Each structure stands twice: as C-alpha cells, then as structure tokens.
Amino acid sequence: MTPVSLLPMLLILLLILLWISVVSRWLRVSPQEGRYKSIDGLRGYLAVYVFLYHAIIWYFFLRSNKWTSPPPSIIHANLGAICISLFFMITAFLFFSKLLHAKERKVDWVRLYISRILRIYPVYTAVVIALLVVVGILTHWRLREPLPQLLGHVIQWMISMAADVNHIAGTKLIIAGVVWSLAFEWLYYASLPFLGLLLGVRSPFYIYLLAAMFLALFIGIIYYWYPANAWNKTLAFTGGMIPAFFAAHPKVRQLAAHWITSLLMIAVLIIATLFSPYIYSFFTYLCTTFIFVAIACGNTLFGVLTWRPSCLLGQIAFSLYIIHGLILFITFMFIVSMPVARLQSPLWHWLTTAGCSLVLVTICTLSYKYLERPFLKATPQVTARAKRWFRLR
C-alpha cells in the first residue's frame, strides 16, 4: 500500500457511505427530493474525493513541509482537475437552466443572490471563525500584526481571498486552501445577468450594475490570488451550460440513461485520468463534459448516483468540501501531532484518515441540519424583507 493507492480510498468511501446512513438515522435527516437526483449524488462523491485528495497531500506535506498540489501521482493530478471541473459544471448547469426557462418562470434575481449568500456564508463563516481560533492557538493568542491589518485580512477571507492571518504563513492550509474555488463560483454568479442578455432575458438596471461590480471584483481576485490555470478552470462552466439546452428532451434522456452510456462514461473517465497531457487540459475538459452531459441528462451510473446513501452524501457535500481541511489540519497538527504523523506508514496514515472521515461526516450532517438547512429555508422570508427594505420588485 502506498500513499496514493486507490484501494484505501475506496474502502474509506464505503465506510463513509455506511456511516452517513447510520448518522442520518440518528439525526433524522432524510434525502430531499429534487429534479436532478443524479447530480445530487455526484456532488457527494466529488466532495469525498476532494477530502481524500487532500489527505494524500497531507502525507507528503508532513514529510517535506511543502504543500504540493497536485500530489506526485498522474492519476490524482488528473482526477483532482476532473473533480473540480465537475463541481463548476454542476453550478453552471443548475443556474444556466434557470435562464433558459426564464420565459416560463421569470428570474427573481434578488431571491437568487440571497439564496446563494444563505447557501454559502453560514457554513463558510463558521469555518473562517474556526480558522481564526486555530491561528490564535498557533500564535498563543498574541497579536503579531496591527489590529486594523488583522481585520483587513479577515475581510479578505470573507470575500474568498486566502490571506495570511497574524503572520501565519500558509494560513489557507488550515482549510486545505479550498477557498479559491469560491471565487470562481462567485464569478459565475456575477456573470449570470449578462449571460441572460445573450438569451434575451432582461433584468433591472440595478442588477446589471451590482453584477458588473462583483464581476470586476472577482476577476481581480482571481487575477491576483488564483491565476494558475484560471482560463481552463473557467472554461469548465461552459461544459455545464451545454446540457441545459437539451437535458429535458425525452430521447436524449433515454439515450443518456442507457447502460452502454454508463460504460462509456467509465471508459472516458479512465482515459482522461491516465492520458490527459496536463491538468485542466482541453482534452480533460472534453472528457469531463461528456461525463457531465450524460449525468445531467439522467444517467445514474447503474443506480449508484441515486442510491439513498449517495443522496444523503450529496446533501452534506458543501459542508464536506468546506470543513474537511479543518478536520485534517486539527488531526495531524494537534491530535496526532506532526512529529508522530510524519513517522506514520501509509497504512497508518490511511487509518487516521478513516477516523477523520467518521468525525467529518458526523460534523457535516450536524452542519447541514442545524446550519445549512435552516438558512436555506429562510430564503423566502429574507428575500421578502430585502425587497421591502430596498423597495425592489
């Protein structure tokens, strides 16, 4: 067994699927019904892979003190890029579909953006607070920079800039650096009114004004903070927009759901994983788009994506994605401790990761029930209040 072996990752995935079934019963959490069950299931598996991907990076980080992403494995380098691209495609598909159906159901821009804020910020804010607590512990609660500068860095974190806080180099590693993807997500949300224009969907002037401001903000953030492969990463959103045009067509859905399509998806995934010339290559984009188009059009990968544990996993996917880095950091830095962790064999490293997975799934299920879901349910009330306060229509 090696630090990049697929077998322990598969075993941990099975453990996670078993454990979420148990925890969801304890906490009385049921999978929510949605139009795109396959996509919900896919989202959960992507989040789990990101967790295991960062567990691999931690193995090498503990021994070299260098955060190397992607890890030294062609398989995981390409799978990591495919995984993130699929996340972006999911976002693009769901929201571009709203624009395509705007003639039947007018886009409520105020509700849309409030729903995004209430979807992301409750959990993300909790994670940033936890990150600041970890920084406080690492610095023995001593202020190493002027208070205004510290507050400025906190504000940067709240708009997806991974600043070093209180002179802790590599502060972003406390959450495995996942904040970068939120900047790309917000970039896409800000572009939606302008994409709507291309489809003949007109919006109030203030929406274009605010969208333009935030579009400029996140273009700047990405340009300055996350320039690596930025164009290639952004291209992934177009792969999610493609199936929105025909995903509801009965004949397309019938073709997508065929077992031969499922086999083709697996074959394409293997080819992209083993033979992509570099991460986020155009070849990777084409292969990932093929896979996503099939799933968006109803393919369930032989029922795996619509299986109850998969749907439960999909519900807590955002918490999994945002929280997992914190669990890994606390485990390897404080509970196991770096001197001990760097001496662990690959087997013990994976056993430690398996233990982390149980804690992570439990915390994320609690997060979904008591943090994510209540805020999501509050969207209509918050939207109504916002419209009254600002006299919006």
Image: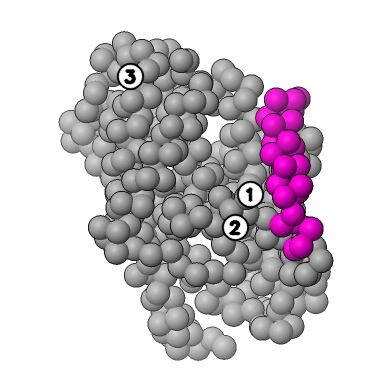
Q: Main secondary structure of the magenta part?
A: helix
Give the magenta part as a residue range.
253-278
Q: Estimate how packed mark 1 is, as few (under 14), some (14 to 19) or many (20 or more) residues with alpha carbons within 10 Å.
A: many
User: Could you give the CA–CA distance between mark 2 and mark 1, rounded to whole angstroms?
Assistant: 9 Å
Question: Does residue 237 lie above or below 288 as drawn?
Answer: below
**Residue 241 in view in this figure:** no
Q: Which residue is mark 2?
A: 38
Q: Is residue 303 magenta?
A: no
Residue 312 drawn above or below residue 262: below
At horizontal 27% and vertical 60% (from top left) the residue drawn is: 27
Q: Looking at the image, which is closer to me, 125 or 348?
A: 348
Q: Residue at x 36, y 21 (%)?
A: 349
Residue 384 coordinates in the image, percent (x, y): 45, 85
The three-letter amino acid code for the residue at tag 1 is: Leu
Which dot marks residue 301? 1
Please indicate, yes or no, whether residue 276 appears anywhere in the rendered image.
Answer: yes
